[in-house]
Amino acid sequence: MTPRARHQRGGSLFLVLIVLATLMLSGLALARMTDTGTLLAGNLASRAAALQAAEVGVNNGYAAVQGLTDEEAIAHRATWYRRTLDQNQTAQGLPNSTPWSNTPTSTVGAMTVSYYVERVCDYTAAAITDATKQCLLKEVDMPVNRAEDPGDRDKQLDNPYATQFRITARVTDQRNTTVYVQALVTKGGN
């Protein structure tokens, strides 16, 4: 053995092991960031699909609202309709006492869509006796009068009022993620 070889103690080996450990940790961190990005993209795509599916629930609820004939009487028979706003709401304004297991349901892809309709009326009233005072109404524009009598021409007709309804659509996907969407809709003149 040469005198030079006897004095080497393996310092470069220690340095190479440190560099290899650093490279390995950097590779693991990069792989983890890639996995997180993939998960995030999947969650965003799932949320977008759920919002699109919620539109089906809102449209189904709107069709049911348009088919209402007696807004007071049906509330006792329907599982999807309430004649007043739910006074037991969550902090986000969602109806808290909604029987979601009994509401109408449809399937959109792998998602389950349900809807619940509430007439936007004061929930403190025992009965709605005067909708113009107890409910949220929207004034519907009427055309200008085209009557035969020249004195009545070009007068604005009286505007009727239309009842407002809040539709809450609930979407549950295959991972049990739940998305809620609410819409305020109008049902014809009273």
Image: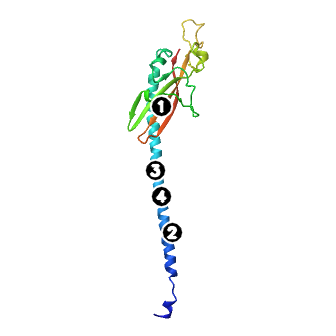
From this viewpoint, which residue is outermost toward the top? 149
Mark 1–mark 4 contact, CB under 8 Å? no
3 or 2: tag closer to the N-terminus: 2
Q: Secondary structure at mark 2?
A: helix
Whether residue 135 is situated above or below residue 178 in the rendered picture: above
Q: Amino acid at mark 1?
A: Ala
Residue 4 point in image, percent of width and height = 50, 91
Q: Secondary structure at mark 3?
A: helix
Position of residue 113 in the picture relative to residue 134 (left or right):
left
Distance from label 2 to label 1 (Cα)?
A: 51 Å
Mark 4–mark 2 contact, CB under 8 Å? no
Mark 3–mark 4 contact, CB under 8 Å? no
Mark 3–mark 2 contact, CB under 8 Å? no
The residue singled out by tag 2 in the image is 22
Whether residue 145 is situated above or below residue 4 in the rendered picture: above
The residue singled out by tag 3 in the image is 39
3 or 1: tag closer to the N-terminus: 3
From this viewpoint, which residue is outermost toward the bottom? 2
Distance from label 3 to label 4 (Cα)?
A: 11 Å
The residue singled out by tag 4 in the image is 32
* Residue 169, numbered label: 1
Label 2 crowd bin: few (<14), some (14–19), many (20+), radius 10 Å: few
Give the quadrant of residue 67. Answer: top left
Q: Secondary structure at mark 1?
A: strand
Residue 139 point in image, percent of width and height = 58, 19
Label 1 crowd bin: few (<14), some (14–19), many (20+), radius 10 Å: many
